[in-house]
Amino acid sequence: FRESGLNVTFQGFTGHGVEGRNVIARVAGTSDEVVVLGAHYDHLGRQGEKIYAGADDNASGTAVLLEVGRRFARKPARRGLLFIAFSGEELGLHGSRSYVGAPLAPLDKTVAMVNLDMVGRLKESLIVFGADTGDRFREWMKDSPVKIVHNKDAVGPSDHTSFVLKGIPAVHLFTGAHADYHKPGDTPEQLNYEGLGRIADLVETLLRRIADAPERMVFVKPPPSASSGARASKGAPPYFGIMPDYGYEGKGVRLQGVAPSSPAEKAGLKEGDVLTALNGKEVEDVKVYSGIFFAMKPGDELEIEVQRGFGVHHRLTICGAPAGDAFTPPNP
């Protein structure tokens, strides 16, 4: 950021046993409103003898963040831009949650947020989550240099969720799940660098349209159907429809919410349930859950062990959970 001529602010945070800092660069505009571009820069690091490089998750998003920041440093827009490298995402969105709790620019002056998380393995299309949270996202991405597949799920386990929950239009750009997710095989030679360049072009154009528009983007609260994941688009990651409670410190994944009409709701899951196992594997926390779940494909069978209330366990088998329309709810 500094090499691009930008001023840098560090935002430290602590909580839930996590300590980290966000790195924030700002490009001033002629308006007091701002647009946020974010990407988390933390990953899993070294575990024993294994190094988890995190090239796609999320050096790829961080690289696009830096490149687009460099472009706006040379040519600002009418509204200001905040380029935020979040920490603590892998442990529960701690960096972005900390930011929206103590924002550098007031949230009522924050027009929109674009989140870059795993954008390094572009194949046929770029998956965009949450475009319907803003009234102009789809229109301003129609001429994208990258083929776009929209997923209506507006919240998920990445930093855009912290902004959506505050009523700020936000999208998550994602090139798809893969077998190297949260594994040592997520290395630089696996990335599509030409694809990263095209995604940077798309992001710059989108941000300039948001930042230069006479009228600010309007937040659209996602309707229940927008979180249902009723159709899994080709190339989209598996969908279940839960919102983890990222502040939960116990064993397992406690559900903060369940999307209406989602496979999770149809299976009988409820807010407050704690997922303790997936397909016979113990789920210690959100990180373990994500590693197991996102290694699956739409249409796979998912067996879940759930703790409800005081130590009561339910075992649910969900056939083809991510496929939505083809889903037949089992009897718990």
Image (tube, grey):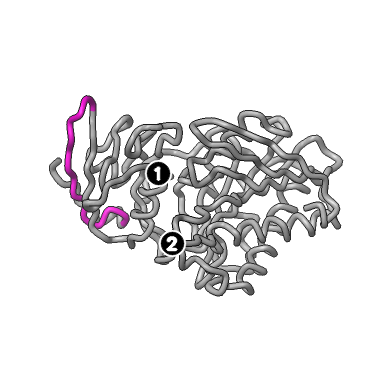
When the figure is inspected, residue 219 is found, relative to residue 118, above or below; the finding is: above
Q: Secondary structure at mark 1?
A: helix
Amino acid carrying label 2: it is Lys
- Viewer-proximal residue, 246 or 258? 246
Numbered tag placed on residue 183 in the rendering = 2
When the figure is inspected, residue 256 is found, relative to residue 87, above or below; the finding is: above
Instruction: Please name the residue shown 45% across and 48% down the image.
Output: 153
Instruction: Please name the residue shown 25% across and 51% down the image.
Output: 281
Q: Secondary structure at mark 2?
A: loop
- Using the numbered discs, state the Cα–Cα distance from disc 2 to disc 1 in whole angstroms: 16 Å
Name the residue carrying label 1.
Answer: 286
Numbered tag placed on residue 99 in the rendering = none
Magenta-drawn segment: 309-322
Residue 310 is covered by the magenta coloring? yes
Instruction: Please name the residue shown 50% across and 52% down the image.
Output: 129
Name the side, left or right, on which 171 lies relative to 48.
right
Name the side, left or right, on which 211 lies relative to 255.
right
Residue 104: x, y in percent? 72, 34
Name the side, left or right, on which 235 lies relative to 67.
left
Instruction: Please name the residue shown 23% across and 26% down the image.
Output: 309
Name the side, left or right, on which 132 lies relative to 255.
right
Q: Between disc 2 and disc 1, whose residue precedes?
A: 2
Q: Quadrant of residue 98?
A: top right
Q: Counting other residues with Cα less than 10 Å from the Cα at mark 1, is it few (<14), some (14-19), or many (20 or more)?
A: many
